Image (tube, grey):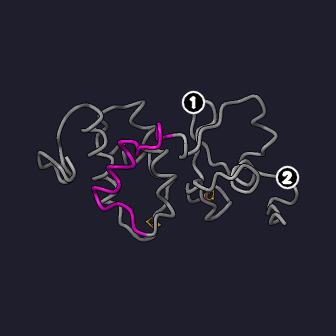
């Protein structure tokens, strides 16, 4: 039997993704729009899937963290999170990956304040934000063809 949706019968997009469509990548940490672990693309904008009623997305494009990677290989943002040591329990990671991917699509080489602002709605309780910043810097460098490692060293772990 499916677990009951906590939004009083109005199923959220997050609930439908996880419990009805079998897409568990988006996490449900707070279900109140406060942690960002459920971040997905709705059309071209990132939203907290726990705050969106499933009925609101009819006919619209929804892309979860499962859709960030193409063809089964890790996306450059996902790989950078691994290489920079930005993943511990991993609960925040899918939302951070989507938010970082969105940032790098808009701003290919963001400055640190831009990264911090873009990820301000995504909470991590265990890794520490320096590694997360390193991961986004590394992904930005790799996407733009530069070989800059976490901390600014040329090369980088894993290439
Ligand atoms: S689960 Fe949606 S913001 Fe926390
Ligand atoms: S890695 Fe555990 S909450 Fe971020």
Left or right, residue 71 beside residue 3: left
Residue that carries the numbered disc 2 in the rendered image: 10
Residue at horizontal 41 percent and vertical 71 percent from the top: 126
Real-space Cα separation, disc 2 to disc 1, in angstroms? 24 Å
User: SS at mark 1?
Assistant: loop
User: SS at mark 2?
Assistant: loop
Quadrant holding ligand 1?
A: bottom right
Q: How crowded is mark 1: few (under 14 residues within 10 Å), some or many (20 or more)?
A: few
In the rendered image, the residue lying farthest to the right is 9
Quarter residue 63 falls in: top right
- Label 2 CB-ligand 1 distance < 8 A: no
**Foreground residue among 64 and 131:** 64
Q: Position of residue 48 (x, y in %)?
A: 62, 48
Residue at horizontal 39 percent and vertical 49 percent from the top: 78
Residue range of the region highlighted in magenta in the rendering: 68-88
Q: Is residue 36 above or below residue 127?
A: above
Pointer 2 with pointer 1, Cβ within 8 A: no
Residue that carries the numbered disc 1 in the rendered image: 44
Left or right, residue 117 beside residue 159: right
Q: Where is residue 125 in the image (x, y as percent from the top left)?
A: 46, 69
Query: Which secondary structure is most common in the magenta stretch?
Result: loop
Q: In which quarter of the image is the N terminus?
A: bottom right
Quarter residue 18 falls in: bottom right
Q: Position of residue 120 (x, y in %)?
A: 46, 52
Q: Does the magenta stretch include residue 121?
A: no
């Amino acid at each position: 039997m499916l677990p009951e949706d906590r939004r009083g019968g109005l199923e959220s997009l997050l609930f439908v993704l996880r419990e009805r469509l079998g897409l568990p990548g988006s996490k449900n940490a707070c279900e109140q729009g406060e942690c960002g672990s459920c971040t997905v693309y709705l059309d071209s904008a990132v939203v907290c899937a726990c705050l969106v009623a499933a009925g609101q997305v009819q006919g619209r494009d929804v892309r979860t963290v499962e859709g960030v990677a193409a063809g089964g290989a890790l996306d450059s943002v996902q790989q950078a999170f691994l290489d920079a040591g930005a993943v511990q329990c991993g609960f925040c990671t899918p939302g951070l990956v989507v938010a970082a991917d969105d940032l790098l699509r808009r701003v290919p080489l963001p400055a640190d304040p831009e990264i911090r602002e873009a990820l301000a709605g995504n909470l991590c309780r265990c890794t520490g934000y320096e590694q997360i910043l390193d991961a986004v810097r590394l992904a930005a460098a790799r996407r733009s063809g530069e070989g800059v490692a976490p901390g600014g060293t040329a090369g980088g772990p894993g290439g």
